[in-house]
Image (tube, rainbow, N blue to C red):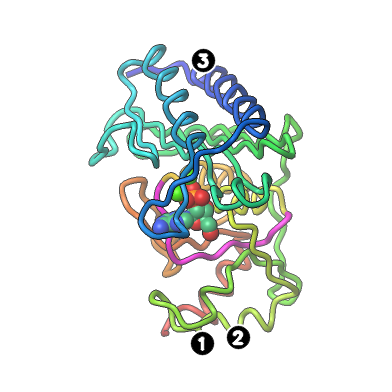
Amino acid sequence: MEHSWEKIDTYAKEWVTEAGKKIKESFSTELLIQSKSNPNDLVTNMDKEVEQFLIGKIKEVFPTHRILGEEGYGEKVESTEGVIWVIDPIDGTMNFVHQQRNFAISVGIFEEGVGQIGLIYDVVHDEMYHARRGQGAYMNDIHLPKLKPVPIEEAIVGLNATWVTENKRIDPTVLGPLVRRVRGTRSYGSAAVELAYVAAGRLDAYITMRLAPWDFAAGMILVHEVGGTVTSLDGKPLSILENSSVFIGNSMLHEQVQKEYIQNR
Ligand code: 2AM
Ligand code: CA
Ligand code: CA
Ligand code: CA
């Protein structure tokens, strides 16, 4: 099927911008905060409202497109067939609730499993990250240059302390030595923001052990467009059908870290 990506792109940007406005307006109203899987797994009325708003718009204009959203108002997506929108209405809900910053709306649009459009909107900083497959990545219409090689010693890596202390998913001695060698580590608490920062060169890599497709869908398209490498921690491609660890970054750094810290462990 032929799609007008230009049209899809224009609408996607418009709707995400409008959703951002709704979130900003919500700062002056009282939030309804609930827990999901555990007391720290938060969801608010705004997570739900924004997802429903975006889905409503998509269904209206593109009724054949399928939608996968974190809060479950989309559908169960078990194949990569056709056009699929992968939506995280608020990535970084804990930050949204506690800090009123460092969260983003994340929308990735895929065709037959291939990323075509990536949008990450950091609402509070008013930074719209945007990529179209084969056409480069932008932040508020400023073109983001291809990532330049960076040695491990000069790298700033997005990494949460969880993964270098006792945890269920990775032996802390795997990444601990990397943390000591890099120039610095950062943790922003929003996968989408961290992936956008990799695309913008503010971080050189981002490593995390547990993400869902809506966390990385848009970011993987952005980082791909600036020539970065996008894989799971063990170097496999990411799929929008599966949760995964994520290792995204500058290609030279990615290769070196894979070789020295991940392989044969
Ligand atoms: P969220 O705010 O949309 O839930 C925080 O370190 C990052 O991990 C955020 O991007 C957050 O997304 C995501 N996250 C939080 N809990 C998660 C879970 N159980 N599985 C996958 N990603 C999660
Ligand atoms: Ca969540
Ligand atoms: Ca998320
Ligand atoms: Ca979310």
The image shows residue 200 at horizontal and vertical percentages of 70, 48
Q: Name the residue tied to disc 2.
A: 177
Amino acid type, callout 2: Pro
Question: Mark 3 packing: few (<14 Cα in 10 Å), some, or many (20+)?
Answer: few
Q: Name the residue tied to disc 3.
A: 7
Q: CA distance from mark 2 to mark 3?
A: 47 Å
Q: Name the residue tied to disc 1.
A: 173
Quarter of the image containing the N terminus? top left
Q: CA distance from mark 2 to mark 1?
A: 7 Å
Residue 236 lies, with reference to residue 56, above or below; the image says below
Chain part drawn in magenta: 202-213
The image shows residue 33 at horizontal and vertical percentages of 49, 44
**SS state under label 2:** helix
Amino acid type, callout 3: Lys
**SS state under label 3:** helix
Q: Does residue 208 appear to the left or right of 64 in the view shown? A: right
Amino acid type, callout 1: Thr
